[in-house]
Image: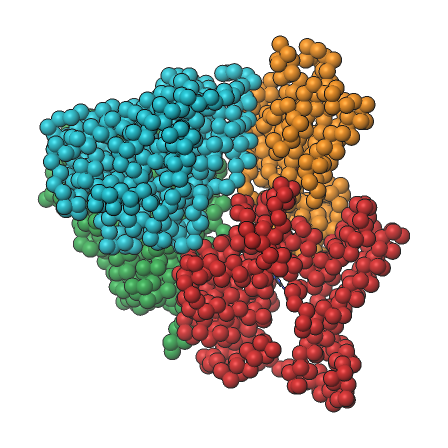
Chain colours: A orange, B cyan, C green, D red
Amino acid sequence: MFYTVGIDVGTSTIKTTLMSFDDDGANEKLVGQVLSKIRKKDAKEVIQQAYGALLAEHALTPKDIAYVATTGEGEMVDFRKGHFYSMTCHARGALFLNPDVRAVVDAGALHCKALIMDHRSKVLSYRMTSQCASGSGQFLENISRYLGIGLEDIWPLSLKADKPEIISGICAVLAETDVINMISRGITTSNILKGIHISMARRLLNLIRMMDVNGKVLMTGGLAKDEGLIAALQELADDDKKGLSIEVVSHALSPFAGSIGAAIWAGYREVRLAA
Amino acid sequence: MTAKKIIEDCEDLYNDLDFTSVKTWKEKTGGKAIGYLPVYVPREIIHAAGMLPVGIMGGGPNLEIIKGDAYFQSYICHIPRSTIELGLLNKLDCMEGFLFPAICDVIRNLSGMWQILFPEKYVRYLDLPQNFDKEIGGEFYRHEMEQLLHDLEELSGNKVTPEKLNRSIGLYNKNRQVIDKLYAMRVAQPHLVLTSDLYLLLRAGNVMDVEDHTRLLEGYMAEVVKEDRKKFDNIRVIVSGAFCEQPPLALIKGLEASGCYIVEDDWVLGARFLQKDVPITADPLEALSDAYLNDSVSTSSKYEDEKEKGKYLVDQVKMLNAGGVIFCAPSFCDPALLERPMLTAALEREKIPHTSFKYAENTGQFSMFREQTGTFADSIKLWGEA
Amino acid sequence: MKKITPAPVAQKDIEKEESMILQKKMIGDHFKRLCTAKEAGKKVVYTFVPGNINELIWALDMLPVHPEINALQSAMRKKSGDYVMEAEKHGHSEDVCTYVKCDIGMLKKGNIGPTGEKLPEPDLLLLSYTGCFTFMKWFELLKQEYKCPVVMLQVPYQANGKIEPKMTDYVVRQLKEKVIPALEQVAGKKLDMNRLSALLESSARAEEDLVAVWDSAKNRPSPIDAYFGGVYYVGPIFSAFRGLPECEEYYKLLRAEVEYRVRHKLGPVTPEGVMKEEKYRIVVEGPPNWTSFREFWKMFYDEGAVVVGASYTKVGGYYDRGFRHDPEKPLESLANYCLGCYTNHNLSSRIDILEKHIKDYDADGFVINSIKSCNSFSAGQLMMMRELEERTGKPGGFIESDLVDPRYFSAANIKNRLESYFQMIEAKRQAAA
Amino acid sequence: MEEDLLAWLLVNYKLAQHRVQLEALKEGCFKDPAVTEATKEALEKIFAELFKEAETMFQPNVKSRSDFFRDIASSGFMTSAEKLAKNDSVLFDRLISIFDRTILRVESKSYATMFETYMTFACEQTVKHPAFSAFGDRIRKAIAYAVSVEFQPINTIGTGYGRARLPFPKNQIRSEILCHGLGAHYMFPGTRTVLDIGGQDTKAIQIDENGIVTNFQMNDRCAAGCGRYLGYIADEMNMGVHELGPIAMKSRKQVRINSTCTVFAGAELRERLSLGEKREDILAGLHRAMILRAMSLLARSGGIDDEFTFTGGVAKNGAATGALRTLVEENYGKKTINISADSIYTGALGAALFAKRDQLGETVNVDLKKLKKQKAAIAA
Ligand SMILES: Nc1ncnc2c1ncn2[C@@H]1O[C@H](COP(=O)(O)OP(=O)(O)O)[C@@H](O)[C@H]1O
Ligand SMILES: Nc1ncnc2c1ncn2[C@@H]1O[C@H](COP(=O)(O)OP(=O)(O)O)[C@@H](O)[C@H]1O
Ligand code: SF4
Ligand code: SF4
Ligand code: SF4
């Protein structure tokens, strides 16, 4: 048996995952994972800490780890053995979390990516959002700040909405004024959030629509925890008259998909290198 | 001179927005210089008139655009605005004339703007034929070249005899042969002839005399084999779409760094536009015209009704044993981006993997490109061809 | 694009409706002809508006289809958004000409034409184009979809502001040696030059009347809106009908109506009735936005702005300076017609044309509607604006939208800019007074 | 002496405004559902600090300060909260979220009817000053009179980004472009080019000798290039927006910022900080990036003509004006560049001038004498 670690370095969070394999690389198992926010700290330090803590928790030392693989902005990690690109990892992680899915939407702090893959998680096609943060995770975070609510409170509130106030195409930064405006017009927080979820979902749907997607779509990345967004995306997809028939699913470990994928690829490479 | 030093010199030329080498050439020879925009002009004619053809490929990543934006909306590609910026900063003053070949509406309209902005300069829109029939398109093109030749004779004060023109044709034939060799070398040993090297070498040809350039290339080829360069586990790809506005050098380097060896590309395409030697005949204009009509590369600014779209690209992939194709085109570039779906369709018929992205010559952020090309390289590496 | 329903106006304005009704009928008939073309054994030729050689097509008894017209009609029927999206799904970039994408998208979705019926497939793609490189790509793309021959007619660019003999020769030669033989082959018959001349003669008469309509904008108030109304006025002559008797009839009728309005000092008819007060006389450069055409127009007439001259209505033929199709020199005049279309003029000439419009029609200023996805028009417009301001001393306004991509019509933004622009003219007037 | 008194009244008037909002903020914070014993204690300390800071904040010798309550309060609050909750990130997060929730409500409240309260407070504060204590009653009387005078506006004109929402008839609404042009003309009659960088948009305007707009360009609804760009960066760094300029001005070697989007620029900032680049150099780069966008709008509107007036909130930022000066000189040669401390009111001033003109039917003539006085006042 051997261990690998996958580290997904994002713009706002670091995801670290520990996995184990049989000697022949089969039977991959998830051993543990940690999520650390970078905030205003030095990312490298955060990575070191997370890595150390995760190993300590499972009574392991760096010597026990056969392969450390990074993804995302992970090229800065000097103790890595290999680096895989993020879509390669998200696809593999998604397949691990849900073997039925062939499409993945990775919605993170700044970027959103949608990809389709085959049964081996080979990326067949993908679409990405542009260099405008409107509708991204950071956008939602800003809004929640303006509304003064925590990230975890977003989805329960959104699900309670009865008359969503739809806004579209607004700047992630100038949205503040729109939010203030809505508050002064007496729109409830729930309805504001749902409206924002709908506009974000539109953006995601536009990515998905650009490809031939059918069946299950797994959400990965930080926004996969946002059930309000997922609900909005599902509703929009159902309403869509263009013959899109998808089921949006998430997984408790969705935010870790990238790091899981990296750890699995690490296992794969390790066996290959040994051979 | 070591290969590294040669490339450093080329990089200096690449970064030199003052066109010092052109000024030096002019001082040395007393000749005049003619700037031309992408993609192709018959440089042989300029050369035969005793002038230096200078390839202008925008301002690149280092030029800050202050006034150029006043001429172009945000949804027009970047190269015309940086070219205007260079013009307004008097950096192109060392050229006596400018040629704008027919390539797209943007360059075409830029020729009109240039006429208004710089009335004291010789400005010519070179209308290239889209009809490839010798009797029709050839006839028209011949008129265009005759006019150009006549104008340049006037501008330079030099008579262009068929002998002179043939001599120039010979020199450019030689130059293209050496470039072809360099490309062949890269195909064989992409880890040795780095794409960034090759690119800088070609760019150097934009601003120097053709004979000097040929010598430079030969010098590099002789030197680079002495280098000990590490071979990476990279995939082999063809890059297509960047025939006009050039990607920033850092992006080219980034492609290599993210796991791709480039075995064919279409940057600085004008230098390789004609694919065979132009024969030395009694009627050199005819020879040039025939070469254009019959032996020029396939690219999106040319209309092709006879040939099957994408066949050229597919053949290249097979011939060069490439693992896939990366379309890398300037944002808002109609010719390249409208061509893309046709090429991808051809690739898909042959099950050749491809990916694509857009850039501007001054793009400064590369992480997204890296992600995309990296994922692309991963998928080919991990799963082989299919 | 015919669906203009003039609000109930005074009885005498019935006349106005007559030309409208006629145009509507013409278009309806044409589409009917198209839908039954295959059964009727008629050949269908796809070709473009700028630089079209309709007379040749008609002379050989074939039917023309203009993809741009389909695109703009799709936009007016609010279908273009989906079509553009469909094309993007098939790998088209968001950056490129949306006319192309709208057409490709429509094709991918079953090629249902403006009347809700399926359009016939082409028997020939006649790539006669002028003023824009994108047309070439467009037909290259269509060629992938249809198994039919293509023939191209390249029209050289007026880079030096004039038509040189070698240009005309080049076009005539292509007509003679490439285009006509290709047409004849598909039509299965020989071209009858007398028939062609007769058609051209009819074209010239319609052209004469159209120019008179443009000229009427010199009156105060102007009886026409040369842009928003103008795009309807050019409908028949730009699209399928130039050379046909009904086209001639349409322009005769239109001219009579306009002359009536001049005599009665009536302003142009807008979707909300006859325009009351003519506050601003404007010249417009650039194509309109089709997805929000009404809304866009309203931003003008609500402010009392009438467009007295426009360059867009010259893309399918520029007749203001005297060019007419000439039955005596059929091929040459077809060549010169192609060479003379608005976007085939270099930038200085385009500025000259607009300057002349501003002066001839005594405009208060000019507005440029810059189309995000049309390089042919847009590249250089900012410079045109500055030159025009300098030459005429009249203020220029600059707005940005798109032809058929609804995502690029930001009403609030455009309205804000136009409002500021009109207020600017007003403030200037007051300051001068 | 006379001006001194006015200046002090103004100082104390601003203090009064500030205190009222601080009170509201404090009250709101304590009422927040998330308040616990620990946060209560922290809040007490924070507000004590904030009130203390406020005392001297508006005095003439104190320089960099925002005009917006939110900026001042948030930077003060953040700093104190950070100090208090040094190692306790839960407490810090909680405090910040209480603040965020409350500030929104405090900000969207209207304080329009408070003139008298503010004035009275300002008066009482001022007469405490040794220079004026001798004239206490005279001052009180004068102010009581001033307060009692009813304004009788002859006309009102609304402008600005939100003008469409004003309950005014159409002829009482004027485009902010025109108002900015006229306002700038009034402040600096020689003006031919105006750049206004406000919170939400940026405008480049060319005007003629009468202050009438001849051409303009403005950016779309994108924060990159407007005041909020810097505001967002300031938030990212837990600072007040007014603190950015002074830091950036210390830079010796600016960094080129590649992101255009504000949010991406924020991420780039963090990334670069973690790569060890200097804070001031990155900030200088950010300021320059923002001014470069303005330069392109200026170019598009027709360039820069003498005289050039820079208005809007960002004109208060030294690093922004510095970058602008450099770029203007490099690209357009030496130009007179006017910057007014009251520049955030340019649009309102222009609207008032239009209101006057519409009502009295006269073109506005600049009263030079008055203007000189005003300039002197600003200089003092
Ligand atoms: N419960 C939640 N509800 C809404 N958004 C969330 C939640 N949890 C995390 N997020 C969002 O996820 C984003 C982080 O996603 P992640 O994929 O880790 O980003 P990156 O990899 O770019 O750092 C944050 O911007 C945050 O807004
Ligand atoms: N003292 C100051 N120092 C630096 N920047 C300031 C200062 N005061 C205001 N600003 C900037 O000015 C912007 C607001 O400008 P303003 O002209 O009032 O905007 P608007 O008129 O659009 O509301 C703020 O976003 C901020 O960036
Ligand atoms: S980049 Fe493309 S669109 Fe731009 S000038 Fe070159 S060919 Fe034309
Ligand atoms: S680019 Fe413009 S002129 Fe060319 S086809 Fe498209 S819309 Fe027509
Ligand atoms: S609109 Fe807002 S989110 Fe989008 S690029 Fe601009 S600043 Fe960024």
For the residue pair C418 and B107, the one nearer the viewer reads as B107
Relative to C359, say whether A29 is above or below: above
For the residue pair D343 and C125, the one nearer the viewer reads as D343
Q: Quadrant of residue C138?
A: top left
For the residue pair D115 and C426, the one nearer the viewer reads as D115
Q: Quadrant of residue D151?
A: bottom right
Q: Residue at the location (54% across, 42% down)? A: A131
Left or right? Give the position of C94 relative to A7.
Answer: left
Residue B240: image location, x then y, percent: 40, 29
Q: Residue at the location (28% across, 48% down)? A: B94
Q: Is residue D254 visible?
A: yes
Q: Exactly how many numbered labels are in the figure?
A: 0
Residue B135: image location, x then y, percent: 15, 30
Q: Quadrant of residue C222?
A: bottom left
Relative to C157, say whether D317 is above or below: below
Q: Quadrant of the C terminus of chain C?
A: bottom left
Farthest residue in the right direction?
D37
Left or right? Give the position of A19 relative to B1.
Answer: right
Relative to B60, say whether D329 is above or below: below
